[in-house]
Image: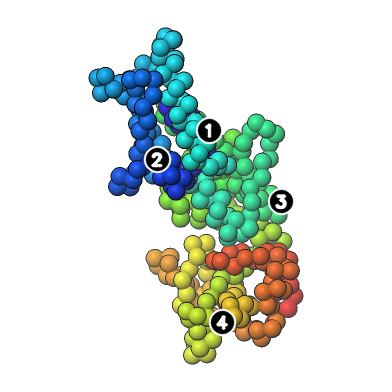
Amino acid sequence: MTLEEVLFARKSPCKDKLIEYGFSPQGEDLFYTEDFGGSFRAEIRIHQEHLSGKVIDTDTEEEFRSFRIRDDQGAFSAEIKAQYIGILERIAAACFREEMFLERQSRALAAYLKETYDDEGDHPFKAPNPAVSFRVNGSWYGLLMEIPYERLIPKKEGSTEVLNLKADPEKIPQLVQREGIFPAYHMNKKNWISVLLDGSLSNEEVFALAAESRRLTADKKRAAGGSDWVIPADPKVYDIEAAFARSPIHSWHRHTAVMPGEQVYIYYGAPFSCLLYRCLVLSVDEDGKGMLLEAKEKYPREKYPLKKLQAYGLKSIRGARRIPAELQQLLDQEKK
């Protein structure tokens, strides 16, 4: 790893703070220069949240690289290195935020699991091991950890994060043929796979694999995230009552993990703020972006208002997500 990669691991840039600090936008990148040491200039670039840098000898306008050579123990190079590190550390302190995860895709995954299932990662091992596990009904369905690339890809340098996921044993031989998916690292290879979180797979592919692992792990009747879905509808944008009055079967935008045969509850937003329909997912479009819903039950608006939903664990409904166990139990008990 480069000096910059070591110093900025698990850090994300804040664009407004970078510009305030003195970084200048150039296309999609941000640049910063600072003179130091009498005849040297630090040139810092941020590209897609990745920081890189170099030191220029202003007498020759050539890059000074001696301080990067491991065996160079000279006092002069050591002093230049120390001053350059000081510049980087000041930028990190002023313009970057600390992150739990190394990879951007890991952060996106954690946000997806929180938003969809209200699942938050925990640290299953004692410090300093930073591995994070995701659980349903108390059992792991995902273990995210940082490992050297060479553990999975021989001779590849550097480190990344991988996600161990449960998978259908019959599908694992085909899954591990795909780029970015490997036989499970440090887990039972008959039931688990390891997925690189370095962008080898798209976010949507990783999310779908995580959703399947959660489904396989959960006892649907007792899973902490429940087995049914809730999706929001905005009455200011679309009149779903009129749509379902015309026909009980209606097309809807599909969340990645919603599958045929599952139940979806529609939450009608302000000013009504209540659960309004229970629907069955009849089918999913070929492109995976849409689904066909059949309304099975319409509720009086006063039956499941927002305050009642919050009391039963449904704190936010910004997008499609699994129903919390407490609310799932209530809905199942009161179902026609």
Instruction: Name the residue carrying label 1.
Output: 147
Instruction: Name the residue carrying label 2.
Output: 22
Q: Is residue 277 left or right of residue 23?
A: right
Residue 127 in picture, x, y percent from top left: 68, 32
Few, some or many residues within 10 Å of mark 4 (<14, 14–19, 20+): many
Amino acid tagged 2? Gly
Residue at 65 percent across and 84 percent down: it is 301
Q: Which mark is residue 295?
A: 4
Q: Which callout, 1 or 2, points at the residue further toward the start of the chain?
A: 2
Q: Is residue 311 left or right of residue 282?
A: right
Few, some or many residues within 10 Å of mark 2 (<14, 14–19, 20+): few
Amino acid tagged 3? Gly
Residue at 39 percent across and 65 percent down: it is 287
Q: Secondary structure at mark 2?
A: loop
| Comparing labels 4 and 1, the label whose residue is closer to the camera | 1
In front here: 272 or 23? 23
Whole-number angstrom distance, CA of label 4 to CA of label 1: 47 Å
Whole-number angstrom distance, CA of label 1 to CA of label 2: 35 Å
Q: Which callout, 4 or 1, points at the residue further toward the start of the chain?
A: 1
Residue 241 in picture, x, y percent from top left: 54, 86
Instruction: Name the residue carrying label 3.
Output: 138
